[in-house]
Image (cartoon, rainbow, N blue to C red):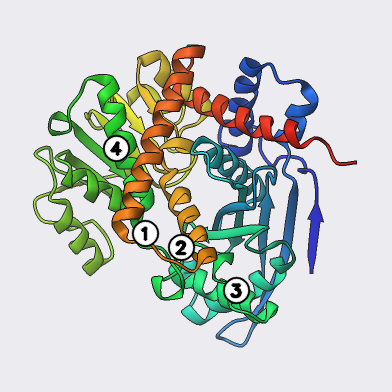
Amino acid sequence: MSQVTTAPAQHATTDEFNPFLSMARNFNTAADHLGLDEGLREVLRRPDRELTVAIPIVMDSGKLQVFTGYRVQHNFSRGPCKGGIRYAPDVNLDEVRALAAWMTWKCAVVDVPFGGGKGGVICDPRKLSQGELERITRRYTAGIMDILGPDRDVPAPDVNTNEQTMAWLMDTYSMHVRRTTTAVVTGKPIALGGSRGRREATGRGVMISCREALKKLGLRPENSRVVVQGAGNVGGIGAELLHREGYKIVSISDMYGAIANDKGLDIPAVMVHLKKTGKLAGFPGARELSGAEALELPCEVLVPAATENQITSKNADRIKARLVVEGANGPTTAPADAILEKKGVLVVPDILANAGGVTVSYFEWVQDRMGYFWTEERVNTSLEQIMVKSFQDVDAVMQKYKVSMRIAAYILSIDRVASVYKLRGVFA
C-alpha cells in the first residue's frame, strides 16, 4: 500500500522548529541574491516526488503492527537522488522533505552528480529486536522498490540505521530484480561493495571544514577548545580526528548527557568507555552535565553533530564559540542563525560541513559501478581535495555577495542546480 504525491501537503507546524520552513527561508534569501524568477523558484522548492508506505510487520510477540515509512525525492536534475534513511519515533514528512532538499543543496555544493533524497520510518529502534528491524527494513524496501535503483535513488544510513540496515536493503532490492545490485545503496559493509573510508567520511569532512575555517579566523588547532555534541559516526569520529589533529576536546555528549574536562578529554579512551558501557556518563576524570549545558561552555569551536534544532533563539545568545561547524543536518534554526551572525560567530553550514559523507558515498557508488575498489588513502585524499575546494568556492561566494557562509552555500548550490535545470529545459 503506498501513496505518491508530487507536491507537499500543508506543513504540520509553522514555527522556527519546522526544518522544511527553515530550509525554505534560506532558499528564498539565496534565490533573491541570484534573481531567480518565481517559476524556477517554485520548481526548485518543491519535491519532485513523495512516497508514503504502510509497513505491516509481524512482531516477535506474534502481533501484527503497521509502521509508516517515507521516501522523498527532492530533485532529479543533476542525477539520481541520494540521501539517508532514518528510523526514529519522531520522523515526520516535513522533516524528511527538509532533509531531502538539504541533500540536493549538499550534493551541489561539493559538485557531485546527485540530486537530493531522504527516507524515514516512524519507529523506536531501541524497543525493537534485530529481527523486527530486519523485517521493517525489508518490507519498507519492497514498498519503495519502484522508485529505487542505481540510476534513480540511492539510499544510505542515517539516524539509527547502519551498514547492516543497508545490507538488508541491498539484498531485498537484489532479490526483487533478480541480480546482485550493490550500487543501489551506499554505506554498506566493505564485503558487500562498501567503500573504505566511508564510515569516517562525515567526521573527516567536519574536521577538514573546521581546519579551513580556523584559517579564516587566524586560529590554530592547538589553541582551540572544542565542544562536540554527539558521539556517533559524525560526532564521535569527528572528535577523534580533531583530537588527533591537536585540538583540545573539552566536552562531548550523547543522548543521555555530556561529559567535560577543561584540560581536555582523552577522546580515544572516551570512545573505548562508550563502546564498553553504552554511554559517556561515568568516564573517569570528567564532570557530567546536560547536553544543553554543554552547548554553552566556553570554547573556540562548537560542533553540533546530533540532530536538528539544537541551537535556537532560546540559547543562541549564550553560545560562546567563535566558530560553529555543523556536523548534523539543520542543528541551527533560522532565528538562531541571525543571533549568531550578529555576534560575529562564523557558522560553517551543514550542507558544506557534513558533506564528506555524501562525497564518499559518491565514491562508493562509482566503485560499485566500475567493479574496481580504491585504497583508503585514495578515498581520503580525494575527499580532502573536494572538501577544501568546496570550502574555497563557498568562501568566494561569501565575499562576493557579502552574506553569511550559510547563505553563500545556498547561493552556490542553487545556482548550480538552476543552471542545469535551465540547460535541460522543461519537458513537454
Which image quadrant: the N terminus? bottom right
User: Which residue shows up at 60% across the image and 74% down it?
Assistant: 136
Q: Position of residue 291 (x, y in %)?
A: 32, 44
Three-letter residue code for mark 2: Gly
Q: Which residue is the site of mark 2? A: 187
Looking at the image, tell me whether mark 4 or mark 1 is earlier in sequence order.
1
Looking at the image, tell me whether mark 1 or mark 2 is earlier in sequence order.
2
Residue 263, compared with residue 398, is above or below; it is below
Residue 67, compared with residue 135, is above or below; it is above
| Badge nearest the viewer, 4 or 2 | 2
Q: Which residue is the site of mark 3? A: 136
Looking at the image, tell me whether mark 4 or mark 2 is earlier in sequence order.
2
Q: Position of residue 423 (x, y in %)?
A: 73, 33
Return the residue nearer the eye: 339 or 188: 188
Three-letter residue code for mark 1: Arg
In this rendering, would 60 be left or right of 342? right
Looking at the image, tell me whether mark 4 or mark 3 is earlier in sequence order.
3
User: Which residue shows up at 68% across the image and 52% down it?
Assistant: 72
Label 1: which secondary element: helix
Residue 199's tag is: 1
Looking at the image, tell me whether mark 2 or mark 3 is earlier in sequence order.
3
How many residues crowd mark 1 within 10 Å: few (<14), some (14–19), many (20+)?
Answer: many
